[in-house]
């Protein structure tokens, strides 16, 4: 099993990369036609909310220890998967 620090570092790197991907989707939406913008905005709002949730989970992981850390890690894994899936789906939809 990965150590806590290794896991947290991996999540920090993922969140950074996902922030960049969401930023690129924001730019793409901004440059889209008005009709497309309306569709994109709702999806991007959801992604931004998921990104905030992922950042919150990262903070929880940083302060948790023992059994609380194990539980937080399981929840964080679900949050990360949900965010990743949302980004992939949005990127596919925007193309």
Image (cartoon, helix red, strand yellow):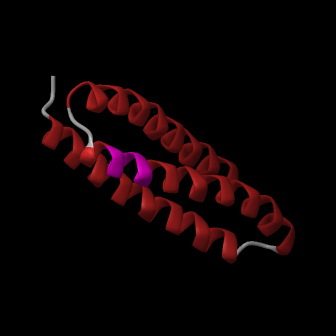
Q: Is residue 78 left or right of residue 50?
A: left
Q: Is residue 66 above or below residue 13?
A: above
Residue 57 at x, y percent in the picture: 40, 45
Measuring 50% from the left and 56% from the top, which residue is drawn there? 52
Measuring 33% from the left and 32% from the top, which residue is drawn there? 73
Snapshot quadrant of residue 1: top left
Q: Residue furthest right?
A: 35
Measuring 35% from the left and 60% from the top, which residue is drawn there? 16
Snapshot quadrant of residue 61: top left
32 or 9: nearer the viewer: 9
| Mark count | 0
Looking at the image, can residue 58 be seen? yes
Q: Is residue 67 above or below residue 23?
A: above
**The magenta stretch spans which residues?**
55-60
Residue 39 at x, y percent in the picture: 80, 59
Residue 32 at x, y percent in the picture: 73, 72
1 or 39: nearer the viewer: 1
**Residue 42 inside the magenta-drawn segment:** no
Looking at the image, can residue 95 be seen? no
Residue 84 at x, y percent in the picture: 48, 42
Q: Is residue 75 left or right of residue 35?
A: left
Quarter placement of the C terminus: bottom right
Q: Is residue 47 left or right of residue 81?
A: right
64 or 4: nearer the viewer: 64
- Dominant secondary-structure state across the stretch colored magenta: helix
């Amino acid at each position: 099993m990965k150590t806590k620090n290794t896991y947290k570092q991996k999540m920090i790197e993922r969140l950074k990369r996902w922030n960049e991907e969401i930023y690129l989707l924001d730019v793409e939406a901004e440059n889209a036609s008005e009709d497309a913008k309306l569709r994109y905005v709702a999806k991007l709002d959801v992604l931004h909310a998921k990104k905030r949730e992922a950042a919150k989970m990262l903070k929880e992981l940083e302060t948790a220890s023992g059994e609380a850390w194990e539980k937080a890690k399981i929840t964080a894994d679900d949050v990360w998967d949900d965010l990743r899936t949302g980004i992939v789906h949005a990127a596919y939809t925007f193309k």
